[in-house]
DNA sequence: ATTAGTTGTCTACACAAATAGACAAATAGG
DNA sequence: CCTATTTGTCTATTTGTGTAGACAACTAAT
């Protein structure tokens, strides 16, 4: 009899448990020996070894024969502030991170009910959809899908292609400044498509931020849905502002 | 040859893909026939059937012989505002939801480096740790771990046990009002312990909110780490405040 | 009634996952 | 040098996953 048949192999569950123990600080520098881990998780030693092998190729662990298995130092999670003023480039540079956006697709679509409500346009109204990939040090960090009214911003795509920045593209289109009206956050398993673009495991977790930006008159400008890799990011919200 | 050996079975990946298609609206009322799903995902029909079986026991689908497989109506995600004033009970009642907190454990612990920094106490200082489970309509929604300085709030546990509310327990301890200083959000797979308490699958995803509350003088009062089930919740952040 | 389309059930087979045991190879400490 | 501890490798066996094909049972439409 299997305890729980959730379609996830035993070695993978052990690997996840070890990863969690490291994240929470239960395991610090060195792992317990394989036989002990096997007992603790109620599996065979070989199953533990497979879990460790996976975490090793992932770069989290390093096994040394005769000595033991050790935890490699990990880069800290990038902290991403969510507030009224959201400027990707500025936020990253504060943490000494050199970002770059990459346009990976642009399409003209019709607004569905939800999008129409967010952007305050009619259902079926033409929208520009911009697909972007944010890259930091050559490592993909997040994927965004932006929606703009095609009537109000007919040239937003070429403007973004030129400048490589939403802020500047909006300025070219006559929006001198904008602010975030609302951000909604949830989390899901990464979609196969995103997994490929973000170069992560097919079962990674993404934080999903669905936000609406408005201009200084309060009129909706952009609806943007961003998927952050949860193990590389932490979203930070401070009420007053720094 | 398998594309990626991430320890997740094929039927499970198909199930996740179907779940995602339903969430994103690609699949609305009725599923495509099993043979078509099998082709689309490049698997055998039996593998699709197993995926559908899992989603059916989960309550998401309902298969009818001779007719097809249908999507059951799902309750909408609960929207949880994060802002300066965070009061669980008030937030839920605005959405016509009757909440109740349950104390599931209390312990005295020593502050580690991170907790000490958050609460502005010395490393090793005594803390009260309060474990709570938030329940809505008999369904567990979130689990919180609260930390208070045991020196400043010696009776916080009994006060919470009496009143069933953090806000009221703090009032009894001399904190008339408080506000949230910072909220950090990330997401992980649920821990085995939390999975049991939250009555969810062992591989469910939780949104993790790590927040610090301060009193009106700005002194840290509470550090609270809450795990929300990601498929039942959406965190909402509005800059100005409604 | 017939037919086409769908889900349900059964058998069989190939292959991966997990268990089990034994021993080699390296390390660290007397 | 010797021993205990630890990771690495090998063989073998059992159990689970995914594939394949066939057919039954049910529905809806002609």
Image: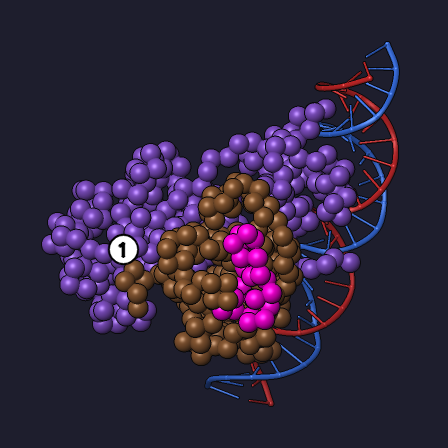
Chain colours: A brown, B purple, C blue, D red
- The question of residue A151 being in magenta is answered with yes
Q: Secondary structure at mark 1?
A: loop
| Rendered residue at 55%/76% (across/down) | A137
Decide which of A160, A75 is in the foreground and name it: A160
- Which residue range is magenta in the image? A141-169
Is residue A110 shown to the viewer in this render?
Answer: yes
Q: Quadrant of residue B32?
A: top right
Q: Dot 1 surroundings within 10 Å: few (below 14), some, or many (20 or more)?
A: many
Displayed quadrant of residue B95: top left
Of B206 and C15, the residue lying toward us: B206
Left or right position of A16 against B15: left
| x 61%, y 49%: residue | A109
Picture coordinates of residue A43, whole percent (x, y): 58, 56
- Is residue A145 covered in magenta? yes
- Chain for mark 1? B
- Where's the C terminus of chain A, which quadrant? bottom left
Residue A206: where, in percent of width, then height? 52, 57
The number of numbered discs placed on residues in the rendered structure image is: 1
Residue A2: name its quadrant.
top right
Which residue is found at the position 74% from the left and 57% from the top? B2
> For mark 1, what is the residue?
B84
Q: Is residue A163 above or below residue A215?
A: below
Q: Is residue C10 above or below residue A2?
A: above
| Residue at 44% from the left image edge and 79% from the top image edge | A96
Camera sees residue B209: no
């Amino acid at each position: 009899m299997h305890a729980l048949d959730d379609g996830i192999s035993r070695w993978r569950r052990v690997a996840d448990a070890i990863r969690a123990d490291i994240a929470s600080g239960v395991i610090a520098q060195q792992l317990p020996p394989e036989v002990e881990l096997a007992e603790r998780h109620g599996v065979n030693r070989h199953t533990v070894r497979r879990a460790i092998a996976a975490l090793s190729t992932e770069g989290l662990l390093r096994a040394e024969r005769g000595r033991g298995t050790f935890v490699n130092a990990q880069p800290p999670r990038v902290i991403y502030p969510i507030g009224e003023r959201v400027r990707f480039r500025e936020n990253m540079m504060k943490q000494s991170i050199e970002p770059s956006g990459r346009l990976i697709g642009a399409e003209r679509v019709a607004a569905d009910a939800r999008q129409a409500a967010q952007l305050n346009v009619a259902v079926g109204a033409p929208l520009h959809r911009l697909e972007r990939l944010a890259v930091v040090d050559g490592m993909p960090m997040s994927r965004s899908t932006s929606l703009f009214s095609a009537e109000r911003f007919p040239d937003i795509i070429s403007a973004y292609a030129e400048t490589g920045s939403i802020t500047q593209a909006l300025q070219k289109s006559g929006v001198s400044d904008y602010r975030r009206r609302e951000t909604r956050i949830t989390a899901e398993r990464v979609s196969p498509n995103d997994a490929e673009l973000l170069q992560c495991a097919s079962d990674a977790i993404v934080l999903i931020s669905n936000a609406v930006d408005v201009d200084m008159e309060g009129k909706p400008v952009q609806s943007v849905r961003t998927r952050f890799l949860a193990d590389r990011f932490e979203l930070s919200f401070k009420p007053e502002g720094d």
